Image (cartoon, rainbow, N blue to C red):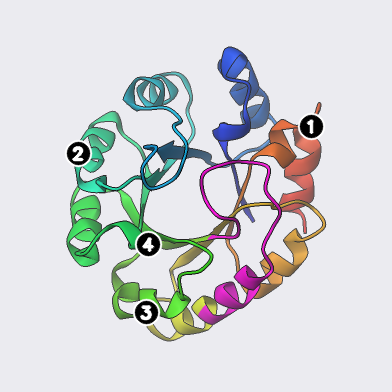
Amino acid sequence: MIIAPSILSADFLNLGHDLKKVINAGADILHLDVMDGHFVPNLTFGYPIIKKLKQNFDIPLDAHLMITNPESYIPVLAEIGVDYISIHQETVYHLHRYIQMIKDYGIKAGIALNPATPISTVFPIIEYLDFVLIMSVNPGFGGQKFLPLALRKISDLKNKAAQINPDLLIEVDGGINHENAKEIKKAGADILVAGSYIFGSDDPSIPINLLKNL
C-alpha cells in the first residue's frame, strides 16, 4: 500500500519538522491539498510552499487541485516539478484536454471525484488516466469521518479498470484510519491519503506502518 500523508493536517508553524518526521517514518508521497476558496470553502497554500517542498524534500509530490481553474495552475506546478496532479471532474468541461495537458508535461494525471459524483462519469476517459482520486469525505477540511459509499465506488472502478486500464492507480482520501483501511484495501485501493490520523500521532511511524501492512 502506498501511503500519502496530507500536509493539510501538519502544523504549519513547524511544517519542515512535521514533514521530516513523516518522511522518516516511511511516507511514500506527500499529498498537497490546493484549495482556492471557491470550489471548496477553504484556502490552503500556493506555489511558494510547494516550491520549497520540492527544493527541500526528496519525495514525490501529489497536487490535488480543489480549484475552479486548474488549467492556470498546471504549467506552474509542472515547472516546480510535482509528480502527480489531479483535477476535479466537477470543475471543468473539457476533461480530456486538461488530462492531456498534464501528461504532456510528463506528470501523472488523475481525476478527483466528490462523494456524490458517480464513478461511471470517469469511465469514458479511464484509458487516458494514471490514477483516480476518490474522495471519501466532502473536500475542503481535514478530520472528517469516512463515508462508506466510497467503498462501492472503489470496487466498481477497480473492476472497470481491470478491463480497460489495469495499470490505473486508485487513490482514496478522507477519514482513513486503521479501522477502515482493510475494507478500503479489499475494495481495490492502491494509495491511501491520511492527514489527521498520521500527523495527529506522536510517532507517525505507527499509523504509517499500520496502513502499509494491512
* Mark before the other along the chain sequence, 2 or 1: 2
The residue that label 1 is drawn on is 201
Instruction: Tell me: 205 left or right of 31.
Output: right
Instruction: Tell me: 131 left or right of 181.
Output: left
- Secondary element type, mark 3: helix
Above or below, 117 against 7 in this view is below
- Secondary element type, mark 1: loop
- Secondary element type, mark 4: loop
Rendered residue at 81%/38% (across/down) = 206
Residue 98 vs residue 88, the one in the foreground:
88
* Mark before the other along the chain sequence, 3 or 1: 3
Residue 157 vs residue 91, the one in the foreground:
91
- Magenta stretch bounds: 135-156
* Residue at mark 2 to residue at mark 4: CA–CA distance: 18 Å
Above or below, 60 against 213 in this view is above
The residue that label 2 is drawn on is 75
Badge 2: how crowded within 10 Å, few (<14), some, or many (20+)? some
Tell me the kind of residue under disc 2. Answer: Pro
Tell me the kind of residue under disc 3. Answer: Phe
Q: Are marks 2 and 1 in contact (CB under 8 Å)?
A: no
Question: Residue 62, position in %: x, y?
Answer: 44, 43
Q: Are marks 3 and 1 in contact (CB under 8 Å)?
A: no
The residue that label 4 is drawn on is 130
Mark 3 or mark 4: which is in front?
A: 3
